[in-house]
Amino acid sequence: MSILLRSLSAAALIAFLSLIVSRSWRRKGVVLRLPPGPKPLPLVGNIRDLPPKGVPEFQHWLAHKDIYGPVSSVTVLGQTIVIINNRQAATYLLEHQWLKTSGRPQTTFVDMCGMSHFIACLSYVDDLRRRRKLMLQMLGTERRTEQYHDAMENSSKCFLNWALTSPEKIFKHLENFTGAAILNATYGYSIGTDQEDPLVRLGRSLMIKFSLAVAPGAWPVDFIPALRNLPDGLPGTESNATARRWKKTSQRMVEVPYLFVRNQMKTGCYRPSITSRLLELHGQKELNSQEEDDIKLAAAAQFGGASETTAASLKGFLLAMIRFPDVQRKAQNEIDRVVGTERLPRCQDRANLPYVVNLVKEIFRWSPVAALGLPHTATEDITYGGHLIPKGAILLPNLWWFTHNPEVYSDADSFNPDRYSESLCEPDPTVAFGFGRRACPGRFFAEASVFTIVSQFLSVFNISEAVDQGFGIKAQPQLKALPGIITFPEDFAYSITPRDDTKDKFVQNMMADQPVQSSDASSLDDAVFDRD
């Protein structure tokens, strides 16, 4: 919010006073009927009620629940934001009323960043329907994701080797694992080694930028679009240069890996992937621009949406195992009993590992990667609970609260896979993947990917609190989220060791039998190597 406040200078307010006043008068009748919220200031509305810098958005908006009720609102320069802190309300508004609430905010800053054509940013239009259909063709059921299990398991084995040789870099290894698995599945691309790969770096860079770009209320130009046309250096134009840099990242994210697949297919020597299969569906026919854009953007959505969100989930998993060691031991005991110690768990073992399956569910509940959910917009006026949600309002479902509500989940801050057992039968946290027609199309891929690495990691390693070497004090890490729509947990201290002496040799022998794949980075367009 500090950027926003600095930018709203007196000059900018005077320049756009007529616009603000006209919007206020047109909505004068509606303002009285909005869901409750803090009292607005003249002209600028609730500008001081936006999340402060450094505070995760879901935490800020959760405070509205106890003050204003389960559905509240703020209005900033004529833009209404509705905060939903009640799962039943979210289900009604975002699922039962999906025809009226499946839009996305068409914000100026997202457009300036070249992200408005991303699947996650499109309103419910033909472009979105076509691209989601392509993703669901490849990933829409558990059965359809089975063709990617081998790629997940091979990437997981590399991760185990990296964790064994340099455990102090575990967070970097998580990024490489998730990047390797999704790049292989989406583009048939191999990162080859544990060195920093340019496409993995590109994906992480883009998703951090995307998470910040789509956060409601973060950018002055979203409230005063004409700021994009002013020269740099004037009040409110700080975001213009940022958008130009981020647009380059967006373009590379879409184009570079797609061109890699096209070039590999021309040689006749390529690994099957989501992108190659979608291209093969067209046979020898020349793609028109719409067909090519659909494939590019469907693939980019899977790459960007899966890589960083999966890494964030796995970071939450490691933290949970430190905080709740009994859960770690119980999962390891189940793996040893069912799988044994002579091989690693595989996706095919899921049916026989119910506790580990529930542990994966608990990861998505305890540390949801999109704690506030991606914003929806109302495409028509909606009446709910005696209040009007006006056309154009932004709707923010607080997924973190939905998965931590103590009325739904007993001892909600505890990490307890048994909550999904028949005796407790608490609801599956599928809400963490979104609502209705905007729910995550890669859910089954994410579940299989997380199961693979969680089960294989627990088969080989223990993770525990780090010990201060000077004082012998154990550090108890806490779950702390960074700001942004995507909830990246902060780094924390840890200690990772093989479960016993045999695991060292086991991983080494496993890697000796693993076919070595060289990196495909040399086949990429040089633009991907430029750092932003």
Image (tube, grey):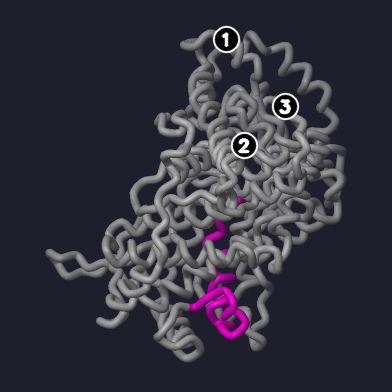
Q: Earlier in the sequence, mark 1 or mark 2?
A: 2
Label 2 vs label 3, nearer the camera? 2
Residue type pointed to by label 1: Leu
Q: Which mark is residue 200?
A: none
Residue type pointed to by label 3: Gly
Q: Quadrant of residue 45?
A: top right
Task: Look at the numbered disc 3 and give the secondary structure of its residue.
Answer: loop
Q: Which residue does the image show at 50% across and 73% down from the upper left?
A: 415
Instruction: Name the residue beneath numbered marker 2.
Output: 216
Task: Look at the numbered disc 1 and give the secondary structure of its residue.
Answer: loop
Q: Magenta span covers which residues?
A: 345-372
Q: Which mark is residue 230?
A: 1
Per the model, the C-alpha gap separating discs 2 and 3 is 13 Å
Q: Is residue 393 visible?
A: no
10 is higher (above) or lower (below) than 378: above
Per the model, the C-alpha gap separating discs 3 and 1 is 22 Å
Prevailing secondary structure class for the magenta stretch in the rendered image: helix
User: The C terminus appears in which quarter of the rendering?
Assistant: top left
Mark 1: give few (<14), some (14-19) or many (20+) Cα within 10 Å: few
